[in-house]
Amino acid sequence: IHISKGELSEDLLPHLYLKNALKEVSKYIGNLSFGYNNGFGYNKLRKLIANRLKHEGINVTQNNILITSGALHAIHLLTTGFLSQNALVFSFTPSYIDSTHIFNTSNLKQIKIPYSNNQQFNKTIQKYHHYKDKVIYVESTFNNPTGQSLSSHSKESIIKLSCRHNIPVIEDDIYRDLWFEEKPSPPLKSFDNSGKVFYISSFSKTLAPALRIGWIAASEKVIEQLADIRMQSDYGSSILSQAVVYEMLKSGDYDIHLTRLRKILKDKQNFMLTILDKLFSTIATWHIPLGGFFIWIKFKDDVNTKKLFLDLLHKEKILLNPGFIYGGEENTIRLSYSYETTDNIEFALHKIHEYVKHCIDN
């Protein structure tokens, strides 16, 4: 039972809409270029993404968009293309980026700051002001793993610090479309008037991970440099996947799918919260995210989450993610309601409660 997975279950994937999109693509497949492209991506998709971003307060054109093979690929392109070895990366924690070790591969030095702590963020930036090569990494909406979002005030503060100290910002906003009742505050990129923010998103969390389509919004100069890096590495993302995503966006099927998806995810979150309230209220704390896939649990007593992980995996075939892999405290875990059925979620939560209570009582 994967109560750990940060992806949609098969029944939540828009199979019919994907099939319809493929039918549309098949009508002009002979007009698509199947040679090595220029690294920028499918122009029609780039233009459509740029137009959609304007509704988020981000004024860009297709020349500001680069298609990538997912968000992590976008981060890799930026770190390898623009940051020297031993550069500083300021990042909020806990964060999924700590589980990827992507910054370690380039010998980058990561400076971790508690999520939404503006005062400490300011002090930390000041402390390292003498370092020449620096970047800020931010998950602005429904952070993985905690589900938290930055307020408009926090975003404005980060932009001011970025401008004052001439530090670029990588904004990772892949969960933004997965809000439940109220649309999140505008992206950090919408406050950017100096081109300091590299804005990243992806369709992996809303359509299907296997499509492998994400994108970066940045200045034209940065996009041109990134396209050149693409041509030296992988020659670009699948043209078929890009065309399918384009057709889903153009037809409006993507937005219809999102409306359904938000409701189902909200219902599944409520289901998980009901069980948590019943079983975990005396042994743990959590806050209720306004979107995304996850609920972040902090146990009130010391719990060996590494042992909990191993016991549940080997004895019960239940897979959860301990919080320490994201830079969280030892007594934290990340629960996902996006992948499993409600029956499996209920079974897993009862087993987790049973094992945690045994740990606490002994």
Image: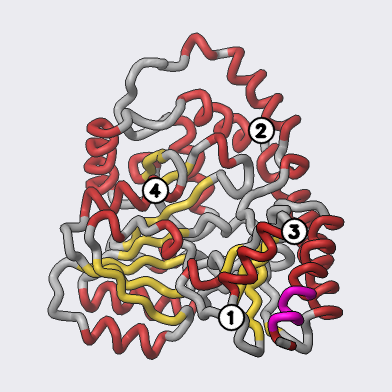
Q: Where does label 4 land, which residue? A: 216
Q: Amino acid type of disc 4?
A: Ile
SS class of the residue under badge 2?
Answer: helix
Determine crowd level at label 4: few under 14, some 14-19, many 20+ residues with C-alpha closer than 10 A.
Answer: many
Mark 1, secondary structure of its residue: loop
Amino acid type assigned to the residue bearing label 3 in the image: Glu
Residue 37 falls inside the magenta stretch: no
Q: Secondary structure at mark 4?
A: strand
Residue drawn at x 15%, y 74% as measured from the top left: 131
Which callout, 2 or 1, points at the residue further toward the start of the chain?
Answer: 2
Could one spot residue 123 in this view of the protein? Answer: yes
**Mark 2 = which residue?**
251
Q: Please name the residue that numbered disc 3 is placed on.
A: 316
Q: Amino acid at mark 2?
A: Ser
**Cα–Cα span, label 2 and label 1:** 46 Å
Residue drawn where x is 70% and y is 25% of the image: 19
Q: Earlier in the sequence, mark 3 or mark 1?
A: 3
Question: What segment is highlighted magenta in the picture?
Answer: 354-359
Identify the mark at residue 331; answer none if there is no mark.
1
Mark 1 or mark 4, which has the lower sequence index?
4
Res. 60 mark: none
First in residue order: circle 3 vs circle 2:
2
Q: Are the residues at dot 1 and dot 4 in contact (C-beta closer than 8 Å)?
A: no
Question: Mark 3 to mark 1: distance in Å?
Answer: 20 Å
Residue 87's x, y, as percent? 20, 65
